[in-house]
Image (spheres, rainbow, N blue to C red):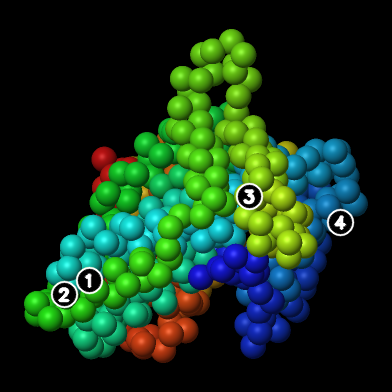
Amino acid sequence: MTETGETSPPREGLPTEGSGFASAAGLIAGPVLGFIVCLLPAPAELDQSAMMVAGLFLLMAIWWATEAVPMAVTSLLPLAILPLIGLVPLKEIAAPYADPVVMLLLGGFIVALAIEKWNLHRRIALNVLRVSGARLKLLTAGVMLTTALLSMWISNTATSLMMTPIVLSVALAAGGGPRLAIALLLGVCYAASIGGLGTPVGTPTNLIAIGWLRDNAGIEISFSEWMGIGLPMIALMLPAAWLILTWGLKSTPDQAQGASESIRAQHKALGRMTRPEARVAMVFGLIAGAWILREQLVKLEPLSGLTDMGIAMMGAVLMFLVPHGDPTTRTAGRGRGLLDWDDARNVPWDVVLLFGGGLSIAAAIQASGLAGWLGGYMAGLAALPPVLLILIIVTLVVFLSEIMSNVAAMTTFLPVLGALAEATGLDIRALVIPCCVAASCGFMLPIATGPNAVVFATRKLTVRDMAKAGFALNVTCIVIIALYFGL
Protein backbone atom coordinates (compact mmCIF):
# COMPACT_ATOMS: atom_id res chain seq x y z
CA MET A 1 0.00 0.00 0.00
CA THR A 2 1.23 3.48 -0.84
CA GLU A 3 0.60 6.10 1.81
CA THR A 4 0.48 9.81 1.01
CA GLY A 5 3.94 11.13 0.25
CA GLU A 6 5.60 7.71 0.11
CA THR A 7 7.40 6.26 -2.87
CA SER A 8 5.17 4.24 -5.16
CA PRO A 9 5.71 0.49 -5.24
CA PRO A 10 7.40 -1.23 -8.15
CA ARG A 11 5.19 -1.77 -11.13
CA GLU A 12 4.61 -4.75 -13.34
CA GLY A 13 7.05 -4.94 -16.20
CA LEU A 14 9.81 -3.28 -14.19
CA PRO A 15 12.22 -6.12 -13.56
CA THR A 16 15.48 -5.47 -11.83
CA GLU A 17 18.85 -6.71 -12.94
CA GLY A 18 18.95 -10.48 -12.92
CA SER A 19 21.23 -12.65 -10.83
CA GLY A 20 22.58 -16.15 -10.76
CA PHE A 21 23.79 -18.49 -13.48
CA ALA A 22 21.11 -17.59 -16.05
CA SER A 23 21.95 -13.91 -15.83
CA ALA A 24 25.70 -14.47 -16.09
CA ALA A 25 25.28 -16.90 -18.97
CA GLY A 26 22.94 -14.54 -20.79
CA LEU A 27 25.35 -11.63 -20.41
CA ILE A 28 27.96 -13.57 -22.39
CA ALA A 29 25.73 -15.66 -24.67
CA GLY A 30 23.75 -12.67 -25.97
CA PRO A 31 26.66 -10.80 -27.61
CA VAL A 32 28.42 -14.00 -28.72
CA LEU A 33 25.39 -15.53 -30.44
CA GLY A 34 24.33 -12.17 -31.83
CA PHE A 35 27.79 -11.60 -33.34
CA ILE A 36 27.79 -15.09 -34.88
CA VAL A 37 24.44 -14.41 -36.56
CA CYS A 38 25.79 -11.12 -37.91
CA LEU A 39 28.68 -12.98 -39.57
CA LEU A 40 26.54 -15.69 -41.15
CA PRO A 41 26.05 -15.32 -44.92
CA ALA A 42 22.66 -13.86 -45.75
CA PRO A 43 20.11 -15.97 -47.66
CA ALA A 44 19.61 -15.07 -51.30
CA GLU A 45 16.40 -13.16 -50.50
CA LEU A 46 18.13 -10.89 -47.94
CA ASP A 47 21.21 -8.70 -47.71
CA GLN A 48 23.77 -8.69 -44.92
CA SER A 49 22.12 -5.81 -43.08
CA ALA A 50 19.16 -8.10 -42.37
CA MET A 51 21.51 -10.56 -40.66
CA MET A 52 22.88 -7.73 -38.52
CA VAL A 53 19.34 -6.80 -37.46
CA ALA A 54 18.71 -10.48 -36.68
CA GLY A 55 21.86 -10.58 -34.56
CA LEU A 56 20.79 -7.48 -32.64
CA PHE A 57 17.33 -8.94 -32.10
CA LEU A 58 18.81 -12.21 -30.79
CA LEU A 59 21.06 -10.27 -28.40
CA MET A 60 18.11 -8.27 -27.09
CA ALA A 61 15.90 -11.35 -26.76
CA ILE A 62 18.55 -13.20 -24.72
CA TRP A 63 19.22 -10.23 -22.46
CA TRP A 64 15.50 -9.63 -21.99
CA ALA A 65 14.87 -13.29 -21.19
CA THR A 66 17.74 -13.68 -18.74
CA GLU A 67 17.68 -10.11 -17.38
CA ALA A 68 21.45 -10.05 -17.73
CA VAL A 69 21.23 -6.26 -17.54
CA PRO A 70 18.20 -4.13 -16.63
CA MET A 71 15.62 -4.53 -19.37
CA ALA A 72 15.47 -0.78 -19.99
CA VAL A 73 19.21 -0.79 -20.74
CA THR A 74 18.71 -3.56 -23.30
CA SER A 75 15.98 -1.41 -24.83
CA LEU A 76 18.52 1.32 -25.62
CA LEU A 77 20.49 -0.98 -27.95
CA PRO A 78 18.55 -0.02 -31.11
CA LEU A 79 19.61 3.60 -30.61
CA ALA A 80 23.24 2.51 -30.26
CA ILE A 81 23.49 -0.23 -32.92
CA LEU A 82 20.93 0.38 -35.67
CA PRO A 83 22.55 3.64 -36.90
CA LEU A 84 25.77 1.66 -37.48
CA ILE A 85 23.89 -0.80 -39.71
CA GLY A 86 22.54 2.03 -41.83
CA LEU A 87 19.32 0.25 -42.77
CA VAL A 88 16.88 2.68 -41.13
CA PRO A 89 17.23 6.49 -40.89
CA LEU A 90 18.12 7.78 -37.43
CA LYS A 91 14.82 9.63 -37.04
CA GLU A 92 12.88 6.42 -37.67
CA ILE A 93 15.01 4.56 -35.13
CA ALA A 94 14.38 7.14 -32.42
CA ALA A 95 10.73 7.92 -33.20
CA PRO A 96 9.27 4.81 -31.47
CA TYR A 97 10.62 6.01 -28.11
CA ALA A 98 8.06 8.84 -28.28
CA ASP A 99 5.38 6.78 -30.00
CA PRO A 100 1.77 7.78 -29.19
CA VAL A 101 1.28 4.43 -27.44
CA VAL A 102 4.31 5.13 -25.23
CA MET A 103 2.90 8.56 -24.38
CA LEU A 104 -0.49 7.00 -23.60
CA LEU A 105 1.21 4.70 -21.13
CA LEU A 106 3.16 7.59 -19.61
CA GLY A 107 -0.04 9.57 -19.08
CA GLY A 108 -1.69 6.53 -17.50
CA PHE A 109 1.24 6.10 -15.13
CA ILE A 110 0.99 9.72 -13.97
CA VAL A 111 -2.75 9.43 -13.33
CA ALA A 112 -2.14 6.21 -11.38
CA LEU A 113 0.47 7.99 -9.25
CA ALA A 114 -2.16 10.47 -8.07
CA ILE A 115 -4.63 7.69 -7.23
CA GLU A 116 -1.96 5.91 -5.17
CA LYS A 117 -0.57 9.06 -3.55
CA TRP A 118 -3.90 10.07 -2.02
CA ASN A 119 -4.95 6.49 -1.17
CA LEU A 120 -8.09 6.54 -3.30
CA HIS A 121 -7.50 2.95 -4.40
CA ARG A 122 -7.68 1.67 -0.79
CA ARG A 123 -11.00 3.42 -0.21
CA ILE A 124 -12.43 1.94 -3.41
CA ALA A 125 -11.25 -1.52 -2.39
CA LEU A 126 -12.75 -1.43 1.11
CA ASN A 127 -16.04 0.00 -0.14
CA VAL A 128 -16.43 -2.85 -2.62
CA LEU A 129 -15.49 -5.45 0.02
CA ARG A 130 -18.11 -4.07 2.41
CA VAL A 131 -20.88 -5.05 0.01
CA SER A 132 -19.39 -8.33 -1.18
CA GLY A 133 -21.03 -10.45 1.52
CA ALA A 134 -19.73 -12.18 4.62
CA ARG A 135 -19.53 -15.81 3.51
CA LEU A 136 -15.97 -16.76 2.65
CA LYS A 137 -16.66 -17.78 -0.94
CA LEU A 138 -18.47 -14.50 -1.56
CA LEU A 139 -15.70 -12.66 0.25
CA THR A 140 -13.12 -14.27 -2.01
CA ALA A 141 -15.19 -13.23 -5.01
CA GLY A 142 -15.32 -9.68 -3.65
CA VAL A 143 -11.55 -9.60 -3.15
CA MET A 144 -10.94 -10.82 -6.69
CA LEU A 145 -13.48 -8.47 -8.27
CA THR A 146 -12.05 -5.49 -6.37
CA THR A 147 -8.49 -6.37 -7.36
CA ALA A 148 -9.45 -6.84 -11.00
CA LEU A 149 -11.30 -3.52 -11.15
CA LEU A 150 -8.36 -1.64 -9.64
CA SER A 151 -5.76 -3.32 -11.84
CA MET A 152 -7.65 -2.17 -14.95
CA TRP A 153 -6.42 1.33 -14.16
CA ILE A 154 -3.30 1.12 -11.96
CA SER A 155 -0.29 -1.17 -11.91
CA ASN A 156 -1.01 -4.84 -11.27
CA THR A 157 1.87 -4.99 -8.80
CA ALA A 158 0.77 -1.83 -6.99
CA THR A 159 -2.75 -3.25 -6.71
CA SER A 160 -1.38 -6.46 -5.20
CA LEU A 161 0.78 -4.54 -2.73
CA MET A 162 -2.26 -2.59 -1.58
CA MET A 163 -4.67 -5.55 -1.38
CA THR A 164 -2.32 -8.05 0.31
CA PRO A 165 -2.31 -6.54 3.84
CA ILE A 166 -6.08 -6.08 3.61
CA VAL A 167 -6.77 -9.72 2.82
CA LEU A 168 -4.26 -10.96 5.39
CA SER A 169 -6.06 -9.06 8.16
CA VAL A 170 -9.41 -10.34 6.89
CA ALA A 171 -8.16 -13.94 6.80
CA LEU A 172 -6.82 -13.61 10.36
CA ALA A 173 -10.09 -12.11 11.67
CA ALA A 174 -12.13 -14.82 9.96
CA GLY A 175 -10.08 -17.59 11.55
CA GLY A 176 -10.24 -19.53 8.31
CA GLY A 177 -6.73 -20.91 8.70
CA PRO A 178 -4.14 -21.44 5.96
CA ARG A 179 -6.75 -22.60 3.44
CA LEU A 180 -8.55 -19.24 3.47
CA ALA A 181 -5.31 -17.23 3.46
CA ILE A 182 -4.06 -19.14 0.41
CA ALA A 183 -7.35 -18.66 -1.46
CA LEU A 184 -7.43 -14.93 -0.74
CA LEU A 185 -3.76 -14.31 -1.55
CA LEU A 186 -3.86 -16.27 -4.79
CA GLY A 187 -7.14 -14.55 -5.56
CA VAL A 188 -5.35 -11.20 -5.31
CA CYS A 189 -2.42 -12.04 -7.60
CA TYR A 190 -4.49 -13.92 -10.16
CA ALA A 191 -7.18 -11.24 -10.31
CA ALA A 192 -4.53 -8.51 -10.67
CA SER A 193 -3.10 -10.19 -13.76
CA ILE A 194 -6.53 -10.96 -15.24
CA GLY A 195 -7.90 -7.49 -14.48
CA GLY A 196 -5.00 -5.87 -16.30
CA LEU A 197 -6.47 -7.20 -19.54
CA GLY A 198 -9.50 -4.93 -19.24
CA THR A 199 -8.05 -1.64 -20.54
CA PRO A 200 -5.09 -0.63 -22.73
CA VAL A 201 -3.35 0.89 -19.70
CA GLY A 202 -4.03 -2.12 -17.49
CA THR A 203 -0.75 -3.86 -18.32
CA PRO A 204 2.14 -2.94 -20.65
CA THR A 205 1.62 -5.90 -22.99
CA ASN A 206 -1.76 -4.50 -24.06
CA LEU A 207 -0.17 -1.31 -25.34
CA ILE A 208 2.68 -3.21 -26.96
CA ALA A 209 0.12 -5.18 -29.01
CA ILE A 210 -1.88 -2.05 -29.86
CA GLY A 211 1.21 -0.14 -30.96
CA TRP A 212 2.59 -3.01 -33.03
CA LEU A 213 -0.72 -3.56 -34.85
CA ARG A 214 -0.94 0.13 -35.68
CA ASP A 215 2.63 0.44 -36.93
CA ASN A 216 2.90 -2.87 -38.80
CA ALA A 217 -0.65 -3.65 -39.94
CA GLY A 218 -2.30 -0.24 -40.03
CA ILE A 219 -4.91 -1.42 -37.51
CA GLU A 220 -6.10 1.13 -34.96
CA ILE A 221 -7.63 -0.17 -31.73
CA SER A 222 -9.29 2.48 -29.58
CA PHE A 223 -9.61 2.43 -25.81
CA SER A 224 -13.25 1.33 -25.96
CA GLU A 225 -12.52 -1.28 -28.64
CA TRP A 226 -9.84 -2.83 -26.44
CA MET A 227 -12.28 -2.93 -23.53
CA GLY A 228 -14.58 -4.87 -25.84
CA ILE A 229 -11.79 -7.46 -26.06
CA GLY A 230 -10.52 -7.37 -22.49
CA LEU A 231 -13.78 -7.33 -20.54
CA PRO A 232 -15.05 -10.64 -22.01
CA MET A 233 -11.69 -12.19 -21.09
CA ILE A 234 -12.10 -10.98 -17.51
CA ALA A 235 -15.70 -12.22 -17.47
CA LEU A 236 -14.53 -15.72 -18.47
CA MET A 237 -11.21 -16.01 -16.62
CA LEU A 238 -12.09 -14.42 -13.27
CA PRO A 239 -14.96 -16.86 -12.46
CA ALA A 240 -12.74 -19.74 -13.56
CA ALA A 241 -10.00 -18.62 -11.17
CA TRP A 242 -12.57 -18.17 -8.37
CA LEU A 243 -13.94 -21.69 -8.86
CA ILE A 244 -10.45 -23.21 -8.79
CA LEU A 245 -9.45 -21.31 -5.63
CA THR A 246 -12.65 -21.80 -3.63
CA TRP A 247 -13.37 -25.43 -4.50
CA GLY A 248 -14.16 -27.08 -1.17
CA LEU A 249 -13.78 -23.83 0.82
CA LYS A 250 -16.37 -23.71 3.60
CA SER A 251 -17.10 -21.19 6.33
CA THR A 252 -18.88 -21.06 9.66
CA PRO A 253 -21.06 -18.11 10.78
CA ASP A 254 -18.31 -17.01 13.19
CA GLN A 255 -15.72 -16.92 10.43
CA ALA A 256 -18.01 -14.91 8.18
CA GLN A 257 -18.73 -12.44 10.96
CA GLY A 258 -15.03 -12.03 11.79
CA ALA A 259 -14.21 -11.23 8.17
CA SER A 260 -17.06 -8.74 7.91
CA GLU A 261 -16.04 -6.96 11.12
CA SER A 262 -12.43 -6.68 9.96
CA ILE A 263 -13.47 -5.01 6.71
CA ARG A 264 -15.80 -2.60 8.51
CA ALA A 265 -13.07 -1.67 10.99
CA GLN A 266 -10.54 -0.95 8.26
CA HIS A 267 -13.10 1.09 6.35
CA LYS A 268 -13.98 3.10 9.46
CA ALA A 269 -10.31 3.82 10.09
CA LEU A 270 -10.10 5.60 6.72
CA GLY A 271 -12.46 8.31 7.97
CA ARG A 272 -14.27 10.66 5.64
CA MET A 273 -13.06 11.14 2.08
CA THR A 274 -10.48 13.93 1.99
CA ARG A 275 -10.48 16.80 -0.45
CA PRO A 276 -7.51 15.43 -2.40
CA GLU A 277 -9.18 12.01 -2.71
CA ALA A 278 -12.39 13.59 -4.00
CA ARG A 279 -10.53 15.74 -6.51
CA VAL A 280 -8.45 12.82 -7.77
CA ALA A 281 -11.66 10.81 -8.13
CA MET A 282 -13.26 13.58 -10.19
CA VAL A 283 -10.28 13.94 -12.52
CA PHE A 284 -9.96 10.18 -12.90
CA GLY A 285 -13.69 9.84 -13.62
CA LEU A 286 -13.39 12.52 -16.29
CA ILE A 287 -10.44 10.75 -17.94
CA ALA A 288 -12.02 7.28 -17.83
CA GLY A 289 -15.29 8.63 -19.22
CA ALA A 290 -13.47 10.41 -22.06
CA TRP A 291 -11.58 7.22 -22.97
CA ILE A 292 -14.73 5.15 -23.05
CA LEU A 293 -16.79 7.75 -24.95
CA ARG A 294 -14.06 9.01 -27.29
CA GLU A 295 -15.65 7.55 -30.42
CA GLN A 296 -18.76 9.63 -29.71
CA LEU A 297 -16.81 12.72 -28.64
CA VAL A 298 -14.78 12.93 -31.87
CA LYS A 299 -18.03 13.42 -33.80
CA LEU A 300 -18.20 16.89 -32.22
CA GLU A 301 -16.31 19.39 -34.40
CA PRO A 302 -14.17 20.95 -31.63
CA LEU A 303 -13.08 17.47 -30.45
CA SER A 304 -12.51 15.82 -33.84
CA GLY A 305 -8.78 15.48 -33.13
CA LEU A 306 -9.21 13.88 -29.71
CA THR A 307 -7.08 10.75 -29.17
CA ASP A 308 -6.58 8.28 -26.33
CA MET A 309 -3.06 9.64 -25.90
CA GLY A 310 -4.38 13.21 -25.78
CA ILE A 311 -6.89 12.27 -23.09
CA ALA A 312 -4.14 10.63 -21.03
CA MET A 313 -1.92 13.68 -21.32
CA MET A 314 -4.76 16.05 -20.43
CA GLY A 315 -5.41 13.95 -17.34
CA ALA A 316 -1.72 13.94 -16.43
CA VAL A 317 -1.51 17.74 -16.74
CA LEU A 318 -4.69 18.19 -14.68
CA MET A 319 -3.16 16.17 -11.84
CA PHE A 320 -0.45 18.84 -11.60
CA LEU A 321 -2.83 21.78 -12.04
CA VAL A 322 -5.77 20.88 -9.79
CA PRO A 323 -5.06 22.07 -6.21
CA HIS A 324 -5.17 19.28 -3.65
CA GLY A 325 -6.76 21.49 -0.97
CA ASP A 326 -4.91 19.85 1.92
CA PRO A 327 -3.26 22.54 4.11
CA THR A 328 -1.11 20.05 6.05
CA THR A 329 0.56 18.86 2.86
CA ARG A 330 1.12 22.40 1.63
CA THR A 331 2.85 23.46 4.83
CA ALA A 332 5.11 20.42 4.59
CA GLY A 333 6.81 22.05 1.61
CA ARG A 334 5.04 20.12 -1.16
CA GLY A 335 3.40 21.67 -4.22
CA ARG A 336 -0.17 22.86 -4.41
CA GLY A 337 -1.29 20.37 -7.07
CA LEU A 338 -2.52 16.82 -6.63
CA LEU A 339 0.94 15.85 -7.93
CA ASP A 340 4.26 17.67 -8.00
CA TRP A 341 7.39 16.84 -9.93
CA ASP A 342 8.92 15.00 -6.98
CA ASP A 343 6.04 12.53 -7.36
CA ALA A 344 6.80 12.20 -11.08
CA ARG A 345 10.18 10.72 -10.22
CA ASN A 346 8.24 7.57 -9.32
CA VAL A 347 6.99 7.15 -12.89
CA PRO A 348 8.48 3.86 -14.20
CA TRP A 349 10.61 5.47 -16.86
CA ASP A 350 12.16 2.03 -17.40
CA VAL A 351 8.90 0.84 -18.97
CA VAL A 352 8.78 3.90 -21.23
CA LEU A 353 12.22 2.97 -22.62
CA LEU A 354 11.25 -0.69 -22.80
CA PHE A 355 8.32 0.11 -25.07
CA GLY A 356 10.41 2.34 -27.29
CA GLY A 357 13.13 -0.26 -27.72
CA GLY A 358 10.64 -3.00 -28.56
CA LEU A 359 8.87 -0.90 -31.16
CA SER A 360 12.19 0.27 -32.65
CA ILE A 361 13.64 -3.22 -33.18
CA ALA A 362 10.28 -4.44 -34.53
CA ALA A 363 10.31 -1.67 -37.15
CA ALA A 364 13.87 -2.61 -38.15
CA ILE A 365 12.91 -6.27 -38.55
CA GLN A 366 10.07 -5.24 -40.85
CA ALA A 367 12.25 -2.86 -42.87
CA SER A 368 15.05 -5.42 -43.29
CA GLY A 369 12.78 -7.99 -44.93
CA LEU A 370 13.28 -10.50 -42.12
CA ALA A 371 9.56 -10.63 -41.35
CA GLY A 372 8.65 -11.53 -44.92
CA TRP A 373 11.46 -14.07 -45.14
CA LEU A 374 10.27 -15.81 -41.98
CA GLY A 375 6.75 -15.83 -43.36
CA GLY A 376 7.84 -17.81 -46.38
CA TYR A 377 9.17 -20.59 -44.17
CA MET A 378 6.00 -20.70 -42.09
CA ALA A 379 3.63 -21.16 -45.01
CA GLY A 380 3.22 -24.84 -44.10
CA LEU A 381 1.38 -23.88 -40.94
CA ALA A 382 -1.46 -22.54 -43.07
CA ALA A 383 -2.79 -26.11 -43.27
CA LEU A 384 -3.55 -26.15 -39.54
CA PRO A 385 -7.05 -25.16 -38.39
CA PRO A 386 -6.95 -21.64 -36.88
CA VAL A 387 -8.05 -22.88 -33.46
CA LEU A 388 -5.17 -25.39 -33.35
CA LEU A 389 -2.65 -22.81 -34.50
CA ILE A 390 -3.81 -20.37 -31.83
CA LEU A 391 -3.78 -23.15 -29.22
CA ILE A 392 -0.11 -23.91 -30.00
CA ILE A 393 0.92 -20.25 -29.85
CA VAL A 394 -1.03 -19.51 -26.68
CA THR A 395 0.32 -22.58 -24.88
CA LEU A 396 3.88 -21.62 -25.75
CA VAL A 397 3.43 -18.01 -24.61
CA VAL A 398 1.65 -18.92 -21.35
CA PHE A 399 4.35 -21.29 -20.16
CA LEU A 400 7.16 -19.09 -21.48
CA SER A 401 5.78 -16.20 -19.43
CA GLU A 402 6.30 -18.32 -16.31
CA ILE A 403 10.07 -17.94 -16.66
CA MET A 404 10.51 -14.59 -18.40
CA SER A 405 8.90 -11.16 -18.31
CA ASN A 406 5.56 -11.00 -20.10
CA VAL A 407 6.75 -7.79 -21.76
CA ALA A 408 9.86 -9.56 -23.07
CA ALA A 409 7.84 -12.57 -24.24
CA MET A 410 5.38 -10.35 -26.09
CA THR A 411 8.05 -8.18 -27.69
CA THR A 412 10.02 -11.24 -28.81
CA PHE A 413 7.02 -12.99 -30.37
CA LEU A 414 5.46 -10.10 -32.29
CA PRO A 415 7.73 -10.15 -35.39
CA VAL A 416 7.30 -13.92 -35.64
CA LEU A 417 3.52 -13.60 -35.40
CA GLY A 418 3.55 -10.98 -38.12
CA ALA A 419 5.45 -13.32 -40.43
CA LEU A 420 3.15 -16.19 -39.51
CA ALA A 421 0.03 -14.18 -40.32
CA GLU A 422 1.47 -13.19 -43.68
CA ALA A 423 2.31 -16.80 -44.50
CA THR A 424 -1.03 -18.28 -43.43
CA GLY A 425 -3.28 -15.48 -44.62
CA LEU A 426 -4.84 -15.16 -41.17
CA ASP A 427 -5.99 -11.81 -39.82
CA ILE A 428 -3.00 -10.59 -37.84
CA ARG A 429 -5.31 -9.64 -34.96
CA ALA A 430 -6.29 -13.29 -34.62
CA LEU A 431 -2.69 -14.08 -33.62
CA VAL A 432 -1.44 -10.95 -31.84
CA ILE A 433 -4.40 -10.41 -29.50
CA PRO A 434 -4.54 -14.03 -28.19
CA CYS A 435 -0.76 -13.87 -27.69
CA CYS A 436 -1.16 -10.62 -25.75
CA VAL A 437 -3.84 -12.12 -23.50
CA ALA A 438 -1.76 -15.26 -22.97
CA ALA A 439 1.26 -13.19 -21.89
CA SER A 440 -0.69 -12.12 -18.78
CA CYS A 441 -1.53 -15.69 -17.79
CA GLY A 442 1.57 -16.79 -15.89
CA PHE A 443 0.00 -18.13 -12.70
CA MET A 444 2.28 -20.97 -11.58
CA LEU A 445 5.53 -19.48 -10.28
CA PRO A 446 6.43 -16.56 -8.00
CA ILE A 447 8.83 -15.20 -10.63
CA ALA A 448 6.19 -15.15 -13.38
CA THR A 449 4.60 -11.79 -12.50
CA GLY A 450 4.91 -8.96 -10.00
CA PRO A 451 1.60 -9.88 -8.30
CA ASN A 452 2.74 -13.49 -7.85
CA ALA A 453 5.96 -12.31 -6.22
CA VAL A 454 4.11 -9.93 -3.89
CA VAL A 455 1.79 -12.56 -2.40
CA PHE A 456 4.53 -15.19 -2.24
CA ALA A 457 6.64 -12.79 -0.19
CA THR A 458 4.07 -13.01 2.64
CA ARG A 459 5.30 -16.59 3.31
CA LYS A 460 1.71 -17.69 3.81
CA LEU A 461 1.83 -20.08 0.85
CA THR A 462 4.37 -22.35 -0.79
CA VAL A 463 5.53 -22.73 -4.38
CA ARG A 464 3.54 -25.97 -4.44
CA ASP A 465 0.37 -24.11 -3.44
CA MET A 466 0.85 -21.60 -6.24
CA ALA A 467 1.94 -24.16 -8.83
CA LYS A 468 -0.98 -26.48 -8.13
CA ALA A 469 -3.66 -23.82 -8.52
CA GLY A 470 -1.67 -21.98 -11.20
CA PHE A 471 -1.29 -25.00 -13.47
CA ALA A 472 -5.03 -25.64 -13.39
CA LEU A 473 -5.69 -21.98 -14.17
CA ASN A 474 -3.02 -21.91 -16.92
CA VAL A 475 -4.67 -24.84 -18.69
CA THR A 476 -8.14 -23.35 -18.22
CA CYS A 477 -7.08 -19.98 -19.64
CA ILE A 478 -5.32 -21.62 -22.60
CA VAL A 479 -8.55 -23.39 -23.50
CA ILE A 480 -10.62 -20.22 -23.01
CA ILE A 481 -8.31 -18.11 -25.19
CA ALA A 482 -8.00 -20.70 -27.95
CA LEU A 483 -11.73 -21.33 -28.18
CA TYR A 484 -12.73 -17.66 -27.86
CA PHE A 485 -10.37 -16.39 -30.57
CA GLY A 486 -10.09 -19.55 -32.69
CA LEU A 487 -13.73 -20.43 -33.29
Q: Disc 4 residue type?
A: Ala
Please give the residue where the numbered disc 2 appears in the rendered image: 256
Tell me which residue sits at (48%, 23%) in the image: 295
Q: CA distance from mark 1 to mark 2?
A: 6 Å
Nearer to the camera, 417 or 266: 266
Please give the residue where the numbered disc 4 appears in the rendered image: 80
Asked where in the image residue 137 lies, by quadrant, the reply is bottom left
**Marks 3 and 4: CB-CB under 8 Å?**
no
Q: CA distance from mark 2 to mark 4?
A: 59 Å
Q: What x and y, as percent, mark residue 164?
A: 41, 74
Disc 3, SS? loop
Nearer to the camera, 243 or 115: 115
Q: CA distance from mark 3 to mark 2?
A: 38 Å
- Between disc 3 and disc 4, the foreground one is 3
Q: Disc 3 residue type?
A: His
For marks 2 and 4, the one nearer the N-term is 4
Q: Disc 1 residue type?
A: Ser
Q: What x and y, as percent, mark residue 262?
A: 29, 75
- The numbered disc on residue 260 is 1
For marks 3 and 2, the one nearer the N-term is 2
Nearer to the camera, 20 or 49: 20
Mark 4 Cα-neighbour bin, 10 Å: few <14, some 14–19, many ≥20: few
Q: Is residue 423 visible?
A: no
Disc 2, SS? helix
